[in-house]
Structures are given as C-alpha cells and as structure tokens.
Image (spheres, rainbow, N blue to C red):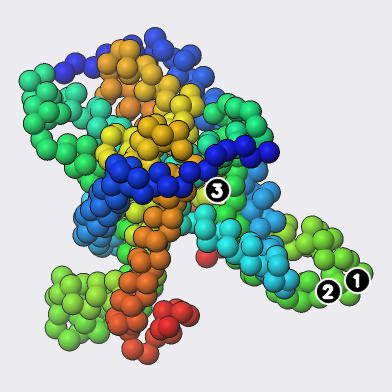
Amino acid sequence: MNFEWQVISNNFFFLMGGLVTTFELALIAIAGGLTLGILVGMGRLSKFKFIYYPATLFVNLMRTQPLILVIFWFYFLVPLIIGRPIGGFTSAVIAFTIFEASYFAEIIRAGIQSISKGQMEAAYSSGFTYWQAMRYFIIPQALKNMMPSLITQAVVVFQDTSLAYVIGLREFLRSANIVDAREMRSVELYLFVGLVYFIVCFSMSRICKKLELKKGYA
Amino acid sequence: MLNYDFKWSILWTDPYGGWILEGVATTIKLGVLCCIFSMLLGIVIGTLRITQFKPLRIFAEAYTEFFRDIPLLVQLFFWYFAVPSLLPENMRTWVYQEIPDFEFWIVVVGLSLYSSSRVAEQIRAGINSISPDQFNAALSTGFSHYQAYRYIIIPLAIRLVIPPLTTEILTIFKNTALAMTVGVLETTFMSQQVEAYTFHGLEATTAACLIYMIITLIVVGAMGRIEKRLAVPGLIIRKGANS
C-alpha cells in the first residue's frame, strides 16, 4: 500500500467547499440552537405549567432520539408542512437547530439556576419586568457561567454536522466520500478529514480548558 | 397544509413490520456489545489517566483526546473504508466478502473505541471524586498499589459514576443509529428502507423514534434499579433512583 497524498491537493477546493458548508451549518445551528435553547431553558424554569410541561417534554423527547433520526424526520416532515420540497441544507438547519436547542436548554437552565435568587428579586424591586431582568441580568450571567459547557456543546454541534451526510448534503465528510468514490483513496482522504476535525475540535477544547482555569470554574 | 395520506398500517404490514423488528434486534445486539466493550476499555483507560506512571498517563490522555475530537461518523468510515484498503488486494476481498456481518463488527469496534474514551472521562471523574484518604487507608492496611485500586478505588468509583454512565449508555444506543451509514440493518436503516419501498417515510421514522424512546426508558429504569442496589451506604443518592 503506497500513499498518494496528491489526492488531497488535487481535490483541495472541492474538499474545502465541503468544509465551508460544514462551518456554515455549524454556525447557524449553534446560533439557532442557542437562541431557541435560551427560550426553552427559561421555559424549563417557568412557574406556569402550560410553559413548563411542553418545554420539559420537548427537552426529554429530543434527548431520547438519535440525531440521525431527527434529521430524517424533518427531512420528510418539513416539505409536507410548507407544501413544497426544500433543499437538504434548509432541512438540516431546521433539524439541527431544534435538536441542539434541547441540549443547549439544559445548559442554560443549569446556568440560570446557578445565579442567586436575590438577583432576580433585586431586578424586580428596581422595577424591571421579567423579560428585562432576564435580558439584562440573568441570561448574560448564566451564559458567562456556563461558557465552558457551551463551548463543549458547540464542539459537539460541529462534529454532529457530519451527520447531515445521510440526507446527501455535501458537507465536509460527504465531499471526501464523493472524492473517495472517484479516486479510491480512502486512507488518505479519511485521515485528512479526521485530522481537520481533530485540529478544530482540539483547539476549541484547549480554549475551553484555558477559560475554565482562568475563571476558576469547576 | 398537511396534504399527506397517513397510512400507519404499513407498520404492521408484511414484510415491513418484520423488517423493523429485525432492525430493533440488531440495534439491541449492537448496543449491548458496544456497552460491554466500551465499559471494560473505558475503565482501563480511565484508570490509566490518573496513574503515577507518566508514559501510560500520556497515552491515555492522547487516546481520549483522539477519539473524542473526531466525529464518530468519520471514525466509522475510517474503519470501514480505509482500514481494509490498507490490506493486500486478496485479503481485502476476503474481509469484505467472507467475514459474516463485517459491517456489524466494524461498528462494534468503532463505536466501542469511541465510547470508551467518553466512559474513561467519567471513570476518571469518579476516581477523582474519591477522597485520597481511602487510598492512603488501603495502603496503610497493607494493600499494594494495584490491590488498592482493584478492591477499593475502582469498585467505589464505578458505583459513584453510575448516573453519568447511564447517560453514556443512552448515548451508545443512540449512536448505534449511525451504523446505518455503513449498511448495518438496524432500526434506522430499516425505517429508511420502509420509506424507500412505500414512500411512507414519516410513519416509519416516527415508529423508529418510538422504539428509541422505549429503549431509553428501559435503560433508565434498569440503571435506576442498579443504582439503588449498589448505592454506597451513607452517600446521598440521586433523587428518583429509589422510586
């Protein structure tokens, strides 16, 4: 077996195109998942039962499901609801946002719970409404306290985007797969893909560790 | 809005119902095997991460980083496509054609290695949470280093990490769904096969969702019982475990 690393350089732009899609998908999924996750996380602590129960049900339901199945599910469902076919990317974005929101929600909930009740009371007594208090006091602190967990989850989302492969979305792994089908150089291609993922994820987890040490987070 | 003709009966029409049941059997088989292997490997790696001997510690650290920072799907593809192509031509054909359920065993290997790195992290956290006094007490009672780990620290750590291990087991069962990408006929694969034959993807996928939900409930229930039975006397056990 001899290696032919030219397969990487020959198809470099094609592979990088896939990597760009992966990053796009990851960033949208993280932004969307975090936004929805904040709302659901707040819902998980709501004293109104009609908010608390749906939020809890949503989180627990999503966490029992394999992501791959959720991707398929939205792939079939979304075109039915809006009545026309949508591309793989849009349906992947929807599936990822909703799925990852359930994971972000639990982190946000823990973050909100880590903040003392007095803060909320102080905000109320200064005349802030619930939304204002959340917006200006609680959520920013919760995000800051939970930064290591949030970064870890962001790395997980980044890795998870490789699952969009199953609906034929041409992200990084799928691009490598396409090149492999043409060139039959599995070892070089998958080692390269693994290496790129490793570099991104490893540096993120280093940043995360530094943050933990610097801020003295547990 | 929803102009879709729901036809749930395909789920119990022959042969589609049978396919899904076969898929469930494969999912369970795969999940159980991966759980066993990743637990065993995870305990070893997790213990190595805190040994005094530096080379072993570095090896274990590299191992966990390596498997954790590469997506599982990439790892599975590596094992399935790349590793056999390292073999000579005739052996490769033999591997793909003669080994029964080659894809199945590849996933067992890939998923176990991947999960073992996650289990190792939990074990390490568990060991770290045990106070060093326990270890010192064991040594002063005349236990050797190995014996202290074998009889005192590891048994305690395993009992302490049952709740996070439950999460890992659930993750393993969810991750078995990835096996479909290399052609293992498990639940998700079968549900997509039903969709390919009948165009009723929504029903089939929903059925698969329910199956994973049931598996989760069973695992959570079983682990709750184990947790209750193995609870270390004198420690606070998780709320709900004793129900």
Q: Amino acid at mark 1?
A: Ser
Which element is circle 2 on?
A: helix
Q: Nearer the viewer, residue A101 or B55?
A: A101
For this view, does B196 lie left or right of residue A42?
Answer: left
Res A140 quadrant in image: bottom right
Q: Nearer the viewer, residue B158 or B210?
A: B210
Instruction: List the single residue furthest toward the top.
Output: A10
For this view, does A91 lie left or right of residue A195?
Answer: right
Q: Amino acid at mark 2?
A: Ala
Which element is circle 1 on?
A: loop
Which element is circle 3 on?
A: helix
Marks 2 and 1 on same chain: yes
Task: From the image, tell me which residue sits under label 1.
Answer: A126
- Tell me the residue at 92%/69% (across/down): A127
For this view, does B198 lie left or right of residue A70?
Answer: left
Q: Whole-percent x and y of residue B92?
A: 12, 24
Q: Is residue A198 visible?
A: no
Task: From the image, tell me which residue sits under label 2.
Answer: A122
Q: How many angstroms separate mark 1 from mark 3 (CA)?
A: 37 Å
Q: State the mark number for residue A99.
A: 3
The first of marks 1 and 3 along the sequence is 3
Q: How many angstroms separate mark 2 from mark 1 (CA)?
A: 6 Å
Q: Whole-percent x and y of residue A155?
A: 50, 44
